[in-house]
Image (tube, rainbow, N blue to C red):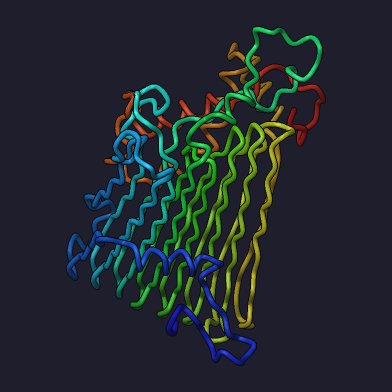
Amino acid sequence: SGPDHNVGEPISQFAINNQQGTACFAALNSVRAGAVALMDVAPGTDGGIDEPKPTLIINAQTSNMGCTAGAAATGVACHPRVLAIAGEGCSASLVQSYIDLDDDADDDGKEFKAKLNNGFTQVFVKGSANMTHAYLEETGGIVTSGVEHTDFDGDDASSDDVDPREVEAKRPALRNTHLETIDVHVTGDDGRYKAAIMGLGGNGRSRVALTASLLRPGSHASLNGFILAGGTQRTETKTNIHHIAQGTTSEQTQRNMVGGRATSSFRGRIRVEQSAQQTDSDQLSRTILLSDKSRVWTVPSLEIIADDVKCTHGATVSDLSEEELFYLRSRGVDRETARNMLMYAFVDEVGQAVPSSVRGDDDLDSSLKRRCIKRLQNVVPQGERAARGEFQSV
């Protein structure tokens, strides 16, 4: 690709820019970033090892982001920057984790500050290198459950009842915005990049935009993503896999789970240039809607200029399977547990792409599995469906 991620002559029909509307935020990060976390793996390091020891970059935040009590600032912006380089023939693993240091940001006695996180991660994969990248976003606490119910609108509601929608509207983390731009360039022959992106946080607005440019013959990209949205969150995922060299391959699986009154969108693009003959690319987006108040927009797309390619893409939107729920309940599993089991099974495929040393022991409360289950339990649908049907979410 050329300067500013452009490909093709700017006055031709093949001109394209891969920034997906994130260029201004990437530029803001370049101006405001105070330091860069550099991961530079020497050529041949851990070559041939399936799962090398990961480099862990943790971005931890408190409820007030270090501001003193009574400070005039109403919000805080941070601009983390990461540069990862995988040398020729090496095996490398990068894990980025965003976490809260406060167990409960509402009750810790500190003055809450709204946060803008504007991250920018650049990854360069050289010849025959194997790069594994996991991105875990768990900031913003946990959303309020039950906001999809309308029982509090009628005359039958008790004066002692608390409307979950009012609780969610007052939740401080709803004012937070989390943005991340991930820019990947496979610059060597037979380079491989594998990503697992998991958004589990409770921030009011979040967006992850990932671009993978396959610049050399034989290069490969594998993208696995999962986004969990609940309460009144707004989440967005944008991906772009750009096949530029001949004989490149890619595969993408995006999973979304949307409950409460949340809104989520996925826009995934695969672009195959004229020079990228014999490309093989697969893309699939799967979404589960957990309530009739939740919304999702899923837009997988193919832009193919070459004529000798094998490309597929698709999208599904559904509820939890009634047949699978019946199977579990007929064997003594209660309704809520059965739903939770199906929900975690939906997530687990993406979770398995995270290095085992980061996932931890499944029996420990601190493991990735337990943390996922805790957040899933918060959006599990309550009660029986008002209407039966495979695609009915009530």
Where, quadrant-wise, is the C terminus in this rendering? top right
Q: Please state if 191 lies on the left or on the right of 39 as rendered.
A: right
Residue 163 at x, y percent in the picture: 65, 19
Q: Please state if 299 lies on the left or on the right of 78 as rendered.
A: right
Give the camera-side residue of 126 and 143.
143
Q: Please state if 350 lies on the left or on the right of 366 as rendered.
A: right
Give the camera-side residue of 112 and 282.
112
- Kindly identify the residue that appears in the image at 40 percent across and 58 percent down: 194
Residue 208 at x, y percent in the picture: 49, 55
- Kindly identify the residue that appears in the image at 68 percent across and 21 percent down: 326
- Kindly identify the residue that appears in the image at 37 percent across and 50 percent down: 134
Where, quadrant-wise, is the N terminus in this rendering? bottom left
**Relative height, residue 204 to residue 46 (above, below):** above
Give the camera-side residue of 277 and 266.
266
Residue 92 in which image quadrant = bottom left
Residue 365 at x, y percent in the picture: 34, 24
- Kindly identify the residue that appears in the image at 81 percent across and 26 percent down: 388
Residue 241 at x, y percent in the picture: 52, 68
Residue 67 in which image quadrant = top left
**Relative height, residue 345 to residue 115 (above, below):** above
Residue 71 in which image quadrant = top left
Q: Please state if 328 lies on the left or on the right of 82 as rendered.
A: right
